[in-house]
């Protein structure tokens, strides 16, 4: 059994050596397809990291009318805190808002003079709400605007942030969809190229295959070398694709290109490096082996008929 497996593997390797130019071309096509698949995987992770980062920075401020009582504002705060999707609620009193405003604009003499002329505190009390996910803000806003305390609420600034979040999700979904579609097309091309490569190898050896069948060789033994050829081709294509991305990651990190760090490229790649290796090599093997099996099966079926 082991001897048969070794012979099959040896014949498969010989097929690659005999058709080195075609094999290199096939490896290159699969490499390109895997690069796009890997790029889509990385873009998806980076876009999710970016969205998560922006979600942590996005919040909703609820501004109350000037005559709203502090105990009513605190009751609203308590109600909001009971929502499971709410991460944090901060109460900002009129006094604290004025103190923060003065500290922020202390160098603006005209603004400070205008504030003194007013004589009273013009700033409202407010609640600063942070949700676990940005998608929760719309429901929270609807609850506040239609709840029992809607009459003491002056304004909620969710609509200003909503456009940013929706635009971000739209871009992220477009990147994922476009990347997936392009990956699928290139994977299909890689399968077709590998299929034709193996088919050419089969036809170049059809007399030898017929001789093997006459002396009792099984379909598995005939199929084996070509499947091994596909497996080896896919393995090398996947390994080269992984090393390419690893080299890019090392090169970018050594140059200290901040934008990639901010997008979470380095962290995401390093945290998922084993998964990425499996995707690249596994993807290459699956694409190439599937195409090889398809080509051999089609040939054997044609010969049988």
Image (cartoon, grey):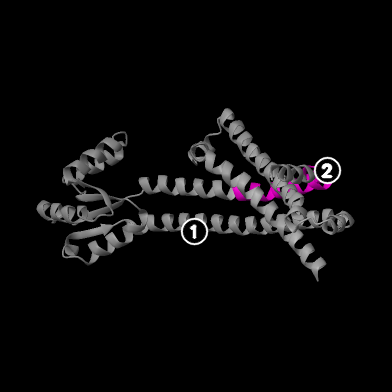
Which circle marks residue 20 in the picture?
2
67 over 263 or under it: above or below: below
Which circle marks residue 170 in the picture?
1
Q: Quadrant of residue 49?
A: top left
Q: Quadrant of residue 62?
A: bottom left
Side of 263 where 84 appears, left or right? left
Q: Which is the main secondary structure of the residues drawn in magenta? A: helix
* Crowding near the residue tagged with mark 2, few <14, some 14–19, many ≥20 C-alpha atoms within 10 Å: few
Side of 264 where 26 appears, left or right? right
In magenta, the rendered stretch is 13-38
Which residue occupies 56% across, 33% down?
257
Which residue occupies 17% across, 60% down?
152
Residue sitting nearer the eye, 117 or 35: 35
Give the spatial CA distance, label 1 vs label 2.
45 Å
Q: Is residue 33 magenta?
A: yes
Side of 138 where 260 appears, left or right? right
Q: Position of residue 30 (x, y in %)?
A: 70, 49
Asked whether the residues under the numbered discs 1 and 2 touch, taking CB atoms below 8 Å apart as contact, a structural biologist would say no
Q: Position of residue 233 (x, y in %)?
A: 73, 46
Q: Residue furthest top?
A: 254
Q: Which image quarter is the N terminus in?
A: top right
Q: Which image quarter is the C terminus in?
A: bottom right
Q: Quadrant of residue 95?
A: top left
Q: Position of residue 153 (x, y in %)?
A: 20, 59
Q: Secondary structure at mark 2?
A: helix
Which residue occupies 32% across, 57% down?
137
Q: Secondary structure at mark 1?
A: helix
Which circle marks residue 114 in the picture?
none
Q: Is residue 114 magenta?
A: no
Q: Which callout, 1 or 2, points at the residue further toward the start of the chain?
A: 2
């Amino acid at each position: 059994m082991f001897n048969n497996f070794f012979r099959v593997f040896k014949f498969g390797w010989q097929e690659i050596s005999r058709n080195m130019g075609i094999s290199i071309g096939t490896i290159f096509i699969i490499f390109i397809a895997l690069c796009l698949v890997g790029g889509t995987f990385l873009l998806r992770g980076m876009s999710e990291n970016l969205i998560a980062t922006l979600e942590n920075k996005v919040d909703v401020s609820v501004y109350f009318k000037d005559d709203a009582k502090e105990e009513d504002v605190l009751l609203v705060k308590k109600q909001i805190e009971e929502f499971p999707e709410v991460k944090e609620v901060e109460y900002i009193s009129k006094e604290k808002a004025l103190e923060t405003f003065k500290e922020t604009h202390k160098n603006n003499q005209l603004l400070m003079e205008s504030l003194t002329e007013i004589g009273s505190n013009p700033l409202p009390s407010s609640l600063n709400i942070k949700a676990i996910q940005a998608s929760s803000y719309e429901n929270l806003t609807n609850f506040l605007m239609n709840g029992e305390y809607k009459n003491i609420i002056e304004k909620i600034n969710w609509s200003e942030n909503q456009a940013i979040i929706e635009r971000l999700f739209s871009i992220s979904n477009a990147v994922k969809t476009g990347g997936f579609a392009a990956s699928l097309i290139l994977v299909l091309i890689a399968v077709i190229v590998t299929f034709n490569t193996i088919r050419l190898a089969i036809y170049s050896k059809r007399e030898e295959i017929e001789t093997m069948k006459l002396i009792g060789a099984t379909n598995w033994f005939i199929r084996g070398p070509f499947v091994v050829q596909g497996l080896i081709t896919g393995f090398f294509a996947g390994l080269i694709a992984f090393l390419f991305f690893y080299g890019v990651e090392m090169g970018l990190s050594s140059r200290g290109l901040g934008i990639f760090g901010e997008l979470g490229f380095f962290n995401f790649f390093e945290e998922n490096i084993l998964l990425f290796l499996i995707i690249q090599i596994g993807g290459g093997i699956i694409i190439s082996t599937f195409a090889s099996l398809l080509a051999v099966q089609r040939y054997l079926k044609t010969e049988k008929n």
